[in-house]
Amino acid sequence: MLQPASAILFDYGNTLIQFGPSQLAQERAALSVLLNRFYPGIDLSQMEDIRLRQILSVYKGDFKESPFEAVLAEMVNELNGAPPSDQELAALCECREQAFVDSITLPHGVEDVLQKLKASHRLGLVSNYPCGSSIRRSLEKIGIDSYFDAVVISGEVGYVKPHPDMFRVSCEKIGFPADACIFVGDNWLGDIQGAKQAGMQAVHTTEYEPYECFEEQPGDADVDGRINQLVELLDLL
């Protein structure tokens, strides 16, 4: 059982919603149409490898987030041998944002859990993603934006979890200190270790297969709870 808490903070992708191979494939498909239009004959065979490398790269070094525009410009430069024009980059950013929003759906039962928790806790969302408007638009699309008292996104903070700034900002926005918060996430390094280092309780969810897979390491902080489905969180509180 977890200790009583005033706030519950959630990761987004692969915690509240699924974000894996299917969603990434939708993004690639949408971008491919535009890339082929801008750069006829471009070889897109390495696009998936580039995307996955970019996702993992932010967890190295100082956990600095890469701006949305920089991520896409790097991809184009690697695929095409030259950077995109300002107009092309703007169109690609818009395309990827819309593709992300279109790919997100609300799993069965998530809203019921949020509704129950909202009655007794302040709720927050803390997501690693380079584009804040993508996350906020998707929350509105699937109808759960109103449940959150705070939304913190790495693209707006400038760092990704497990960097302490993500958790510091989360506490400031939710209005409670770290020791009054429970963090729920799938990423062992970013969510669980980051939350524990910040002084929060942490619950590890394994409902979805993460694409950024970090194994437990010797010396890691112990998790305070484990769940296979989000609804199981209710039994831990």
Image (spheres, helix red, strand yellow):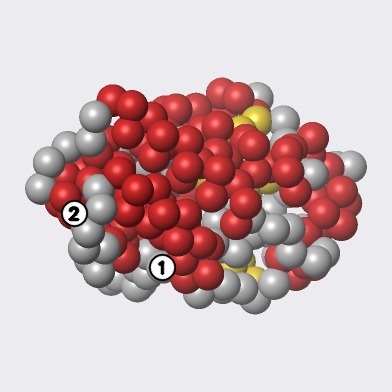
Q: Say above or below: 180 vs 149.
A: below
Amino acid type at mark 1: Tyr
Q: Which mark is residue 211?
A: 1
Neighbour tally class for label 1: few under 14, some 14-19, many 20 plus, Cα within 10 Å: some
The residue at 65%/43% (across/down) is 138
In the image, 217 versus 141, the foreground residue is: 141
**Mark toward the viewer: 2 or 1:** 2
The residue at 82%/64% (across/down) is 109
- Asked if disc 2 and disc 1 are in contact, CB closer than 8 Å, the reply is no
User: How far across and down, in percent of the image, does residue 17 sit?
Assistant: 64, 59
The residue at 35%/48% (across/down) is 37
User: How far across and down, in percent of the image, does residue 220 sit?
Assistant: 35, 63
Q: Residue 132 carries which label?
A: none
User: How far across and down, in percent of the image, does residue 131 sit?
Assistant: 46, 36
Q: Which residue lies furthest to the left in this view?
A: 81
In the image, 92 versus 178, the foreground residue is: 92
Instruction: Give the spatial CA distance, label 2 vs label 1.
Output: 22 Å
User: How far across and down, in percent of the image, does residue 41 sit?
Assistant: 22, 59
In the image, 82 versus 234, the foreground residue is: 82
- Residue 171 seen: yes
Q: Identify residue for label 2.
A: 79
User: In this rendering, would 234 be left or right of 125?
Assistant: right
Amino acid type at mark 2: Leu
